[in-house]
Image (cartoon, grey):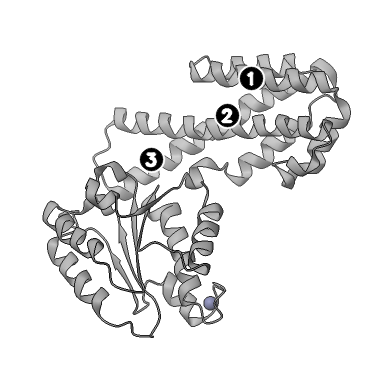
Amino acid sequence: MNITAAYELLKNAFASGRAAHAYILAGPPRGSCQAVTEKVLQLLFCESGEACGECRGCQRVVEHSHSDVLWVEPEKKSRIISIDQVRNLQTRVFQTSFEGGWRSCVIVAADRLGQEAANAFLKTLEEPPERCVFFLLTDSPQSLLPTILSRCQHLRLGGEKEELPDDVEARLVEILSMTGENGSLGALGQADAMKALLKDIKTAVEEGEAELAEEEATAHEKDVLDARVGARFREVRTSLVRFVMLWFRDVLMLLCDADALVYNTRHIEAIRKRAAAVSLSQAMKDLAMIEEMHRRLERNVNDAVVFSLLFTSLE
Ligand SMILES: [Zn+2]
């Protein structure tokens, strides 16, 4: 699920008094997981109770300086969360809260709990303090003790990786909006534009990963970096195909007068234009074609070939 969906789910859980003692947020720990956690904590500590983002309570949450929120991260040198850190956590969570309300403990990269530390933490989860909520953020929940896993509620965050970068989305919408206006020449134009877009995505991914490797100061051998670039590129491409699929699905929904079921309401005007230009049977063919494209990409058929084929077969 994305950040908004996860936040809404947690918000409802707290509002209805059915929140769990502990949540595992699976996804990029310092990315979407942290974003959701901070937003929920703002909800708990906001002076207006609405996660306004402006008040002192909200600000201290994002600065990680709130006295009722303990952030636990792996130690710099050993890169693990030590037993001492867990003991400190245990002392803190059983103290009464400074402000008389909720307390929380966020464990960033919870898979880094050392064995002894994990066992100690398990004890806390077995008898959790009142009015205290734990957030365990991790990108590899499978590395946590099964006994810890079973005591937490799980939320899987696709996070930002599921969503297209804004600039990519804008260009994609432009390309999709070209459909059906200029006949086959338009289709070739679309295929070319799509090729160019994929090339730029690739470049952006390469630059991003190189930067990341530098920041992490890891020994970045070329094949490791290449593998990362490949994986990230495929992620963006999958989101892109998903976006295209939903686009054509929305066209079909509009043609069936099911406007309320349109997913991509942000671009409904452009989608409406497409719907006005095609027949129902054509829209269904288009969707089948996109699915075929998706299968081919999964089988590693060359991107450019697949996209040219797609646009030339769309009327
Ligand atoms: Zn606030």
Task: Verify CB contact (< 8 Å) between mark 2 and mark 3.
Answer: no
SS of the residue at dot 1?
A: helix
**How far is disc 2 from disc 3 in space, using C-alphas?**
18 Å
Question: Is the residue 160 above or below the residue 127 in the image?
Answer: above
Q: Residue furthest left?
A: 116
Residue type at numbered disc 1: Phe
Identify which residue is drawn at 15% across, 61% down: 120
Q: Earlier in the sequence, mark 2 or mark 1?
A: 2
Task: Verify CB contact (< 8 Å) between mark 2 and mark 1.
Answer: yes
Residue, disc 3: 210
Residue, disc 1: 307
SS of the residue at dot 2?
A: helix
- Within 10 Å of the Cα at label 1, are there few (<14), some (14-19), or many (20+) other Cα atoms? many
Give residue 23's position: percent from left, percent from top: 37, 57
Identify which residue is drawn at 85% across, 35% down: 273
Residue type at numbered disc 3: Ala
One can see residue 75 in this view: no
- For the residues carrying marks 2 and 1, which lies nearer the camera in this image? 1
